Amino acid sequence: MYNNKLDGPIPPELMNCSKLRILKLGNNLLSGSIPSQIGKLQELYYLDLSGNFINGKIPSQLGEFPRIDTVDLSMNNLSGGIPVFVRKVPHLDICVELQALGWWQSHGGARYWHILVKRYRFYGKSVPFVSSKDALKNATLRGYFNSAQALADYARFSYTSRKIYRTKCLPLWLLEHLMEEYRHIALGAVASSAPILYFDNITPSNAYYDLVTKDFRDIRVVLKRFGSNIIFSNGLRDPYSSEGDTTISVTTSAAGLLSSPILLEREALLATGWWVNNWATTGNYTSDHCKWTGISCNSAVSVIGVSLLWYENDNITGELGRFKFSCFPNLRSFKIRSNYLLSGSIPSEITVLSTIRTLELTSNNLTGIIPSEMGRLRNLVHLDLSNNHLTGHIPPTLGRLSKLKILNLSSNSLVGNVPSTLGHLTQLTTLAIASNQINGSIPLEIENLKVLQVLDLSRNEIGGSIPSTIGHLKRLRILDLSQNKLVGPIPSSVGPLTQLTTLNMHSNRINGSIPLEIGNLNFLQVLGLSDNKLEGPIPSTIASLVSLTSLSLHYNNLIGPIPLTLGHLNRLTDLDLSENKLVGPIPSSVGHLNFLQVLDLSNNKLEGPIPSTIASLVNLTYLSLQDNNLTGPIPSTLGHLDRLTYLDLSENKLVGPIPSSVGHLNFLQVLDLPNNKLEGPIPSTIASLVNLKSLSLEYNNLTGSIPLTLGHLNRLTFLDLSDNKLDGPIPPELMNCSKLTTLILGNNLLSGSIPSQIGKLQEDN
């Protein structure tokens, strides 16, 4: 069953197949632990569980196989020590963290053991397989590379991977090929196949004085004294190549190869052209690449960080493939934001970066798929590929990035489901896949992300219901599921998410009532449930959300009155309850919302007068009470709202005159009062609204003449005074409104001629 998409645990019942000799479940999506019943497979001689999400300890029952020849547990999430019983296994393949090695005393009897350790490279007289503490005592860590050692190790690695080892743990460094006939390390020299695996500028004395030919065989590496040539006559097979036949022909001098790696890294940077063009314009040139913009190096002058932002360097063009990632083995951080100038696909070569922790390629113009091989970057903590044009599915292999804390794939063109394997990323704090074309449902495995703080799946095509287990994400601060195709109710289990500051579920097909438990979210600042099919009353518990700044419940089927207790939400800046079936009066407590900037109660069935307390909302910029059953006069105190830019009181039953105080609304751009029962003249103070663009007073009982001063409104584009009782002539001054595009004066009592100046409006607009 090798190399499929099987998931879930390994069933213990499988161990009842007592005659089983070969069990290959590698390269799947299996999780859970290795069943302890595996010891029942007494005929087993080949076991491959590699490339899954298996966790827990290596069971001691693996030592009970009398015929076992090969065990491959690499590329999993195993923990604990390596049991002593493995010395009985001829071919053992494990990929572990350094701290998991544990105590190791004897390796007698084993013919081929492959233990890979992440992050560390050692050199010394031998490679100690003891506790990590002792290993660090007896080994020297180096963080920089030398091309001669690299080529030599490359040759040995190539041979090993072809003859013995299937390199599924790449890119990790093989510490030692523990093979009895290959264990020759002489003091001060490397003889035969002794491991050459320290990529450093400093090497053991005389380490390359001897010929190294025997154990490379068909690669035929000839390494002579310094000054002689190193010849790889048949080329080197690339162990990272999926084809397996990529070769590199090399003929160069050992002295040249033993030179500093600075030149190699510097030339690779120059080849991109991202710095050269910058020097041409700034003249800021230096041969020290560690001082170039966006480059950081370690103490050994090896590049560990690249950070290029378009506003610092506007020459980040061409394709991402220009950057030769294989030349930067110490790279820990790679950030490029080109303002959509950098193109091409994400090269699979990027997966050789075994030390990479931060990979940010946001706001570029990248295309193609996300390589599934990115699941090999086991040290990755921050992955941001947002704001590109990436296509295809989200690779399930990303679930192998067990150290990942931030995953942002937003604003691409990704399709398919959210992989359930992302539930294995137990250190994840941010998961953002917004603005794609993702479908399917929200995977239940997301409940495993116990430290998740941001979950943004908005603007996709995700369907199904919201899983109740989302309530297990107790550290969640932002939950955005808006603009999807979600159905069913809002689960009451959102109540325990007491750290939430943003809850967005608008523009879905969610039904049912708003759960009372939503009142438990004391830190909530934004609540967006608009454009759904919610019904029932607005729960009074919402008044407990004292940190709330934005409440959007519009476009639903909510009924009942507006709770009086909404006036307790004194931090609100936006309140939108429009397009519902709310009844009753507008509570006067609305006037307590001193920070309110937007108030939209339009398209309901509200009745009664406009409360005078609204005049207390001095920060209000938008007020819409349109299409209700409001009665009484327009309060003259509305003139105190001098920051208003939009005022819509249309389609109500308002009576009385238009208060002259509206002329105090100096920032007003839209004044809509049609379809009421307003009477009296149009106040001349309207001429003070110098920013007014639209004035609608149609379908009222207004009388008197059209004020001459309306001609002062030189920003006016729309004027509708139709269906009133206005009389007198059309004032020629009205034609001074040079930006007017729509003028409707029909169904009035106007007299006189049409002003000849009206042609000016035609010329202008």
Image (cartoon, grey):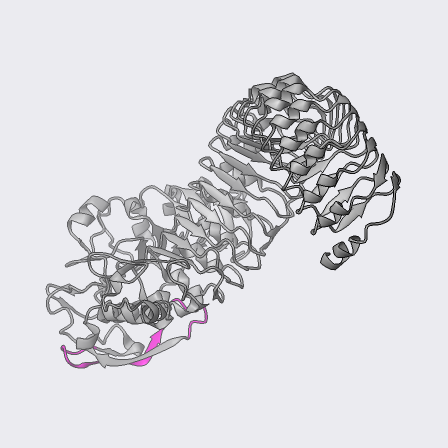
The residue drawn where x is 53% and y is 22% is: 546
- Answer left or right for 38 relative to 731: left
Q: Quadrant of the N terminus?
A: bottom right
Which one is in front, 383 or 600?
A: 600
Q: Please check the rendered image and state whether residue 397 is part of the magenta-colored stretch, yes or no.
A: no
Using the image, determine if residue 273 lies above or below residue 75.
Answer: below
x then y, percent, for residue 25: 50, 53
Whole-percent x and y of residue 202? 15, 63
Image: magenta residue range: 223-245
Q: Position of residue 569 (x, y in %)?
A: 56, 22
Is residue 713 left or right of 175 when viewed as pictured? right
| Quadrant in the picture for the C terminus | bottom right
Tell me which secondary structure the magenta stretch mostly adopts.
loop
Between 725 and 577, the one nearer to me in the picture? 725
Classify residue 375 by image quadrant. Answer: bottom left
Q: Quadrant of residue 635?
A: top right
Q: Is residue 319 above or below residue 547?
A: below
